[in-house]
Amino acid sequence: MVRMSESQSRPYHHGDLRAALLAGAERTLLEKGVAALSLRELAREVGVSHAAPGRHFKDKQALLNALALNGYERLAQALNAADDPALPIEPRLTALARAYLRFAIDHAALLELMYARKHDPDASEQMAAAVERTVGSLAQVIADAQKRGEIVEGDPEFLTLLTGAGLQGIADFTAGGWLTPQAALDGIDALVHHLLHGLRPR
């Protein structure tokens, strides 16, 4: 009787190896952290030879870059789906903020990796473009609001930074357990309102 090898007993659909490896890498990232990521271990889990992942990722760093890029692409899709340029600034920004926070809650470990790879000296132009597609969504909202006279004049990059810092602060508090995901999502309307109107009584 011929005994099937592990790779034969756990086949993947041909052509989907890269996607299977990325999905496996994201599971490992979530469950065990970035230090546990290994191309050899991913190959074992997917059911291919240990050399097979080399056709798509030359090393672990390439895998991490690809995982981060995939995350940025998914975040950009989520933000684009939530954005409606026809809306006034407050509901428009609230919808974007909620989409960002949902992504941050659902993919906290991936988001942390995305930001880490963004600052890597070896990050490619492709990574920079992916970052721009996400940060650019917020920057466009700010620029549009300034043109409409809905918010103050000033450096749009600085206003984008302030807005992004508020959103990321809520995401970090949620990831750290200071806020429950539901409490964070429930507070988005108030966060955006105070960002736009300030804290002083009127």
Image (spheres, rainbow, N blue to C red):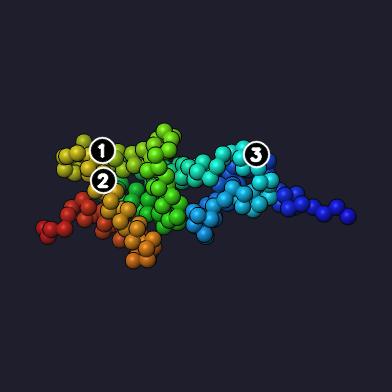
Q: Which residue is mark 1?
A: 144
Q: Residue furthest left?
A: 202
Tell me where residue 126 sits by quadrant. top left
Eye-nearest disc, 1 or 2:
2
- Residue at numbered disc 2: 161
Q: Which mark is residue 15?
A: 3
* Other-residue count near label 3 (Cα within 10 Å), few / some / many at <14 / 14–19 / ≥20: few
Q: Furthest residue to the right?
A: 1
Q: Residue at x 58, y 44 (%)?
A: 19
- The residues bearing labels 1 and 2 have C-alpha atoms spaced at a distance of 16 Å
In this rendering, the answer to whether 195 lies above or below 121 is below
Name the amino acid, label 1.
Asp
Q: Quadrant of the N terminus?
A: bottom right
Other residues around mark 2 within 10 Å, as few (<14) / some (14–19) / many (≥20): some
Query: Measured from the top left, where is residue 100 in percent x and y?
Result: 37, 50
Left or right placement of residue 77 versus residue 158 in this view:
right
> Callout 3: helix, strand or loop?
loop
Q: Earlier in the sequence, mark 3 or mark 2?
A: 3
* Observer-nearest of 92 and 27: 27
